Amino acid sequence: MAEAFPVAFLFFAGAALLLVLPRGPARAGLLLAVPLVAFAMVWALPEGNLWTATLIGVELEFTRVDKLSRVFALIFCFAAFLGNLYAWHVRDLLQQVAALLYAGSAIGATFAGDMITLFLFWEGTAITSVFLIWARRTQGAYHTGLRYLVIQIGSGVLLLAGAGLYWRDTGSLAFEAMTLGSPATWAIFLAFGIKAAFPLLHNWLQDAYPAATITGTVILSAFTTKLAIYALARGFAGTETLIWLGAIMAVVPVFYAIIENDMRRVLAYSLNNQLGFMVVGVGVGTELALNGVAAHAVAHILYKSLLFMTVGAVMFRTGTARGSDLGGLYRTMPLTAIFCVIGAMAISAFPLFSGFVSKSLILSAAAHEHYTLAWAALLFASAGVLHKTGIKVPYFIFFARDSGLRPKEAPPHMLLAMGIPAALCVLIGIFPGPLYALLPYPVDYEAYTVTHLITQMQYLMAAALAFVVLVHLGVYPREMRAINLDFDWTYRRLLPAILRALSGWLAAFWALWARSIEAGLSGVMRGLYRSHGPEGRMAAIWPTGSMVLAIAIVLGVTLIVNFAS
């Protein structure tokens, strides 16, 4: 039964140990040691179902290892290490415990071989991650956390319902490839889609991530959505619906990010956009596409964590992440600026950076399978990425103008946490072989061909030229304090307003109906009173002789009937 101890339990044990360790370097050291030890464990695990348990007659598979689960677990372990290194200065036990439990739950879900185990860890990510939002300890963070928790728990409820229906239909709870077409698989698909931030289900991401603590946002960006991508790749690879959902996800957030002022919200929209590329890859479903999904998930976690770290470092030093309040910070935060530019070039898929060697796998897979419209949408979205993240974030924070702010450079541990993924973004971009070796299927692909390079540089240069021209003409959306309405406005503002308006009409209707019922009952009571009240006919005094006569008649009739029978 126990060939391999579940890696998730190592994180849970580390979180329990944090509760008894004294505050100081010991806790911080444990936060770094646990993910590093877990990384080594995952690397050494053999393939197969390595740890099972039985619950109510159901066999649970806690450690199902193959190349797909391994690559996601490895990057999750590494992301946990980077996030905890970045948060070295944090002495908040709540955040420290939540960070370990959250990472452990994500890794546990990655290795789950059945839907019950997946559900347990799936809900674990929801319950633990919300404390990274609440740890900010503001009223806004409290309400945001509640919305986030409701949505994430709702995803788990759908998953559990789908698992129950799937067991009824098939007699199996194995977490494996499924086909849409039954209430069970649609429920599971929707559960995954909520965490993957599908269109119209995405606003929890832009709502919650910028509301978390500075370090909490970095940790949140690594796990929940990429766990959903893993689940989709495991359960619904080749589902064509995902291609068009992913194309919408890749394109629409571009426009919101361009007009957004809060740089953490810009990065949240950008995260949604990058998920779209991965969802398209899952929908295409070929070996090349799934390799692209896994590779892009790894690259994305590295450069997106890096970008959130750089913006977080700026916020840590200045107290704001609004582009309208920032500018010229390269003077006093030069290393942070360099790291931000590296992250921006990686997410924009410049050659020699990690995004180029991962994103091109997905683009090539879509083109090879003749999904021309989806390929064109991804190409447009790639150009948009350069606008909204590749240029906008570093430009408006570090270079656009002199805001007059002269903050100190980020603390050394933050710089180290940023430097590691920055170096990896470059190394993976130049030497993609080690990353390709970790992917689920053998890789026979060359990223640096003349066609790829020319195509990539054409749209990058065109997008850069468009940005320069728009800024020069003064028509590029300038950074300003504003609230941009997204789909969540419909259920956070519009729906409550409609309900409030309807409540007045419903109250009036209820009052009218109640009055009519009351009037009808009053009429009945008055009629009964006239008949049975003190003055009514039934209350009149009858002579005794009449009563005796009536009884005699009844008795006579009874005797006649008796003798006759």
Image: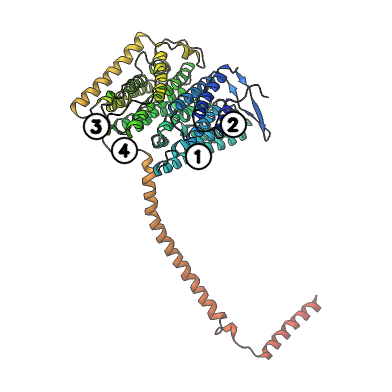
Residue 364 visible in the picture: no
- What residue is pinned by disc 4? 484
Disc 4 to disc 2, C-alpha distance: 39 Å
- Whether the residues at callouts 4 and 2 have beta carbons within 8 Å, the answer is no
Three-letter code, disc 3: Arg
In this rendering, would 123 be left or right of 365? Answer: right
Residue type, label 2:
Thr
Q: Residues within 10 Å of mark 4 (few under 14, many from 20)?
A: few
Label 1, secondary structure: give it.
helix
Image-based side of 254 in relation to 215, left or right: left
Q: CA gap, disc 1 to disc 3?
A: 38 Å
For the question of whether residue 532 can be seen, the reply is yes
- Amino acid carrying label 4: it is Asn
Identify the mark nearer the N-term, 3 or 2: 2
Q: Mark 3, residues whose alpha carbon is within 10 Å: few (<14), some, or many (≥20)? A: some
User: 280 or 291, which is in the foreground?
Assistant: 291
Residue pointed to by mark 2: 117
Q: Residue 244 carries which label?
A: none
For marks 1 and 2, give the CA distance.
17 Å
Q: How crowded is mark 2: few (under 14 residues within 10 Å), some or many (20 or more)?
A: many
Q: What element carries label 2?
A: helix
Where is residue 204? Give x, y as percent.
42, 37
Q: Are marks 1 and 3 in contact (CB under 8 Å)?
A: no
| Rendered residue at 54%/77% (across/down) | 528
Nearer to us in this view, 69 or 238: 69
Q: Which quarter of the image is occupied by the C terminus?
A: bottom right
The label number, if any, that marks residue 478 in the structure image: 3
Name the one closer to the observer, 497 or 508: 497
